[in-house]
Image: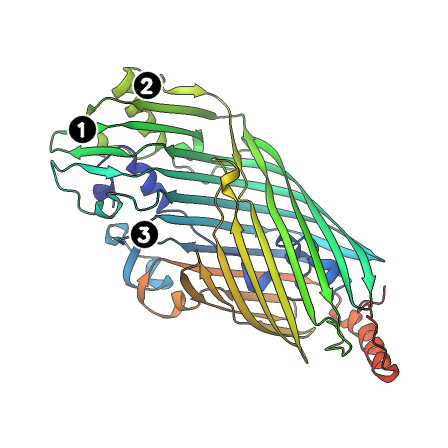
């Protein structure tokens, strides 16, 4: 892959982008009425609207991998683990899109008390995005670049963050009425940044690759990185920056005259959340850089091909343009923003434990150029759930175009699933995969006894008002 991509200085960033993972929202882990402290990460009002009086997450995690530009032929997830990167193929696309959102949720919990709920969570997270300009001239010709033919590289943005979160959750029943309830919630997150990168190719770059020298025209790149990420060391867990973030959520339940089940007495549950509004300021082992040349210049092709990481990219570019390896440095601190997004959800209670839910996720990275771009997704999922078992089969659109079919099951305290089962089963044009799992403890055997009594009493009295399923 490197021989194909090293035809111009900026292509080292595209090579980096191909190695990260691109994720969705881990639907089966976060959306049913027993999701508890897992659900608060998608909508901080979720636990109070759910069926559990308290919940403790032991450990949960998820990772996915999707992009619309690079793929492997006749491959599934198992065979991709041993695949050679030189076998990568390139698609003809109008815009390169790749987004990542992986997580590891460590001990977390919540509990209800009256009209309130409180919780905390500890997570490790990774997020990245690569988005090029629309209709990029030349992006589809990067696989086999001929000598002495001008090629145009489009504008593009790359942002990466690896970080930890220590957060607290608070929720309140804002309105309780026979027709429905309104619940609001918020997460406040204290952030520690391990690694960060942002790279912006601000103008179309034209290069002509020769056997001896490569001509480059109109170079305008601004970028920043921590030393460990710039050197390709993504296993270093030193904290190089700090920040703060927040999530906000609201849920409105529409109650009907006919109760559907003891643990979900709503007809509709409508939700909205604004997640991952925040930033991390990198102060240690960090640097900001710029390479700019409005006039054409040459670089030795062999020297260009020897670049393996961002540190070497910066040194080579700075020596070529300014005759000094550190002349490109413009600062020793930089800020990256979290992958903020808006989620809109709806959940319809069919009855007897059956539901149909849907959600739309929209990224809002236009707020800042150094904000990680979250994936735009739409999903619809039929679901069955009771206190001991749950199953969902989501059908989703990644970037509103690529259809993924998944499945997830919850058995007592274990949840396991994938939002893209086909990537595990079928050998085809492989551009990614998805997997998540979690284990927790909660009082499903205790809360049910209260719910059964209240549900049976409500049936006998034919009461049409809402009953709090947890007895608070």
Instruction: Give the camera-side residue of 465 and 1.
Output: 465
The label on residue 69 is 3
- The residue beneath circle 1 is 215
The quadrant of the picture occupied by the C terminus is: bottom right
How crowded pointer 1 is (Cα within 10 Å; few <14, some 14-19, many 20+) is rated as some
Which residue: 69% across, 60% down?
A: 36
Residue lying at the far bottom of the rendered structure:
460
Residue lying at the far right of the rendered structure:
461
Q: x%, y% of residue 138?
A: 23, 43
Instruction: Tell me the SS state at disc 2.
Output: loop
Instruction: Give the camera-side residue of 118 and 360.
Output: 360
How crowded pointer 2 is (Cα within 10 Å; few <14, some 14-19, many 20+) is rated as some
Which residue: 57% across, 35% down?
A: 279
Q: Are marks 1 and 2 in contact (CB under 8 Å)?
A: no
Mark 2 or 3 closer to N-term?
3
Taking the image as shown, residue 309 lies to the left or right of residue 385, namely left
Instruction: Tell me the SS state at disc 1.
Output: strand
Would you identify the image quadrant in which residue 392 lies? bottom right
Q: x%, y% of residue 210?
A: 12, 33
Would you identify the image quadrant in which residue 384 lies? bottom right
How crowded pointer 3 is (Cα within 10 Å; few <14, some 14-19, many 20+) is rated as many
Taking the image as shown, residue 21 lies to the left or right of residue 350, namely left
Which residue: 52% across, 52% down?
A: 362
Distance CA(mark 1)–CA(mark 3)? 26 Å
Mark 1 or 2 closer to N-term?
1
- The residue beneath circle 2 is 325
Mark 1 or 3 closer to N-term?
3
Q: Are marks 2 and 3 in contact (CB under 8 Å)?
A: no
Distance CA(mark 1)–CA(mark 2)? 20 Å
């Amino acid at each position: 892959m490197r021989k194909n991509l090293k035809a111009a200085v900026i292509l080292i960033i595209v090579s980096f982008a191909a190695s990260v993972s691109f994720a969705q929202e881990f639907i089966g882990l976060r959306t049913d009425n027993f999701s508890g402290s897992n659900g608060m990460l998608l909508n901080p009002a979720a636990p109070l609207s759910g069926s559990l009086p308290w919940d403790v997450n032991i450990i949960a995690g998820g990772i996915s991998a999707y992009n619309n530009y690079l793929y492997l032929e006749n491959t599934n997830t198992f065979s991709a683990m041993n695949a050679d990167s030189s076998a990568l193929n390139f698609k003809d696309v109008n815009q390169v899109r790749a987004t990542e959102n992986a997580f590891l949720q460590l001990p977390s919990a919540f509990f209800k008390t009256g009209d309130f709920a409180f919780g905390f969570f500890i997570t490790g997270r990774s997020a990245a995005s690569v988005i090029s300009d629309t209709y990029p001239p030349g992006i589809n010709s990067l696989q086999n670049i001929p000598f002495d033919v001008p090629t145009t590289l489009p504008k593009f943005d790359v942002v990466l963050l690896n970080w930890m979160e220590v957060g607290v959750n608070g929720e309140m029943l804002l309105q309780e009425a026979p027709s429905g309830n309104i619940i609001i919630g918020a997460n406040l997150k204290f952030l520690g940044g391990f690694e960060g990168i942002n790279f912006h190719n601000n103008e179309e770059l034209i290069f002509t690759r020769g056997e001896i020298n490569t001509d480059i025209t109109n170079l305008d790149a601004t970028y920043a990185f921590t030393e460990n990420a710039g050197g390709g060391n993504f296993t270093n867990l030193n904290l190089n920056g700090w920040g703060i973030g927040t999530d906000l959520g609201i849920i409105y339940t529409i109650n009907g005259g006919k109760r559907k089940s003891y643990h979900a007495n709503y007809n509709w549950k409508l939700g909205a959340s604004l997640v991952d509004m925040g930033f991390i300021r990198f102060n240690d082992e960090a640097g900001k850089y710029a390479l700019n040349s409005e006039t054409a210049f040459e670089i030795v092709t062999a020297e260009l091909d020897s670049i393996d990481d961002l540190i070497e990219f910066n040194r080579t570019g700075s020596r070529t343009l300014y005759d000094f390896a550190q002349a490109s440095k413009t600062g020793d601190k930089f800020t990256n923003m979290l992958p903020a997004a808006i989620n809109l959800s709806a959940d319809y209670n069919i009855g007897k434990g059956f539901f149909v839910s849907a959600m739309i996720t929209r990224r809002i990275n236009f707020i800042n150029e150094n904000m990680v771009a979250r994936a735009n997704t739409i999903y619809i999922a039929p679901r069955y759930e009771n206190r001991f078992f749950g199953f969902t089969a989501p059908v989703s659109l990644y970037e509103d175009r690529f259809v993924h079919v998944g499945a997830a099951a919850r058995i007592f305290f274990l949840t396991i699933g994938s939002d893209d089962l086909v990537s595990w089963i079928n050998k085809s044009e492989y551009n990614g995969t998805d997997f998540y799992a979690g284990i927790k403890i909660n009082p499903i055997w205790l809360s049910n006894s209260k719910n059964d009594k209240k549900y049976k009493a409500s049936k006998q009295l034919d009461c049409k008002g809402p009953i709090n399923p947890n007895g608070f």
